[in-house]
Image (spheres, rainbow, N blue to C red):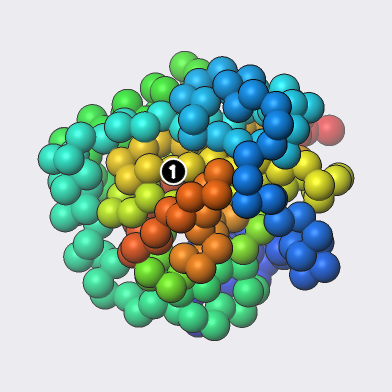
Amino acid sequence: MSLLPTMHRAPPIFRQAPPTMHRAAARLPPARPGPWPRRALCGEAPALVRASGPGVARRLRGQAGVRPGFLSGPEEAALGQEVEPQLRRRRYQFDHWDGAIHGFRETEIAQWSEESREILQRVRDEAFPPGMSQLSLVHVLDLDKSGYIKPHIDSVKFCGCTIAGLSLLSSSVMRLVSEQNPEDWMDLLLPRRSLYILRGPARYEFTHEILKDEESFFDGQKIPRERRISVICRNLPILPAPT
Ligand SMILES: O=C(O)CCC(=O)C(=O)O
């Protein structure tokens, strides 16, 4: 069972139940790139995103993006050193009750060193417009080399329109799949030390997942998955006006 009380006890805070298995089987992207030009994607770092077609690329333009090299090596090391002692107190979980995530441990951190605060502020400045209410707790998720995250949509009760995550220690592939039409997908290559941002339709209308090592291919190329730590900032949901 998760040692983190707020995150995964029923009802799950960040996760809804993953989609059913037959959907997952129906939507694997082909190993080779499609015939349409890959530069017609999110308008940023085009080599890091690949979609099932131009329609999906248009729909997610500006809504799903990756900033490679967002962290320097020393910044990655500083963040890693800061989260490691808290993670080390927890055990990896391989049989989580909601089945959304496998081979992980996690924590939430409110207090950061000055150096990390500056890094996190850069993430916030990049991801959220001024004045947007944000979760003060930063979610830190440590995936074992064999760990992976199944398709899910973060709970709308606890998380607003934007998810911004730093990738430490390993590159990985994040897959977005349309809830409405499983044929519509986008893969994001998340290089080590990059920042990804999901917002709007990418956050609400597409599931997201982190592929396991055996399935970790981007554009036909193997992206080896090592142990990976993500540091994730979210904004607060906009509460409905009182009646
Ligand atoms: O590790 C990541 O970057 C993704 C985390 C995630 O999918 C989530 O917490 O909902």
Residue sitting at 22 percent across and 62 percent down? 84
Say whether residue 57 is visible.
yes
The x, y position of residue 57, in whole percent, is 69, 27
The x, y position of residue 206, in whole percent, is 72, 44
Position above or below: 150 against 93: above
Q: Secondary structure at mark 1?
A: strand
Say whether residue 135 is visible.
no
Q: Amino acid at mark 1?
A: Leu
- Near-viewer residue (131 or 104): 104
Count of number-bearing discs: 1
Residue sitting at 58 percent across and 71 percent down? 9
Would you say 178 lies left or right of 106 here?
right
Q: Name the image quarter holding residue 238.
A: top right
- Near-viewer residue (5 or 233): 233
Position above or below: 32 against 83: above
Q: Is mark 1 within 8 Å of ligand 1?
A: yes
Residue sitting at 67 percent across and 66 percent down? 11
How many residues crowd mark 1 within 10 Å: few (<14), some (14–19), many (20+)?
Answer: many
Residue sitting at 72 percent across and 39 percent down? 52
The x, y position of residue 151, in whole percent, is 66, 58
Would you say 199 lies left or right of 110 here?
right
Q: Name the image quarter holding residue 224.
A: bottom left
Would you say 233 lies left or right of 115 here?
right
Q: Name the image quarter holding residue 39.
A: top right
Position above or below: 198 against 146: above
Position above or below: 16 against 113: below
- Near-viewer residue (15 or 26): 26
Could you tell me which quadrant the C terminus lies in? Answer: top right
**Residue linked to disc 1:** 190
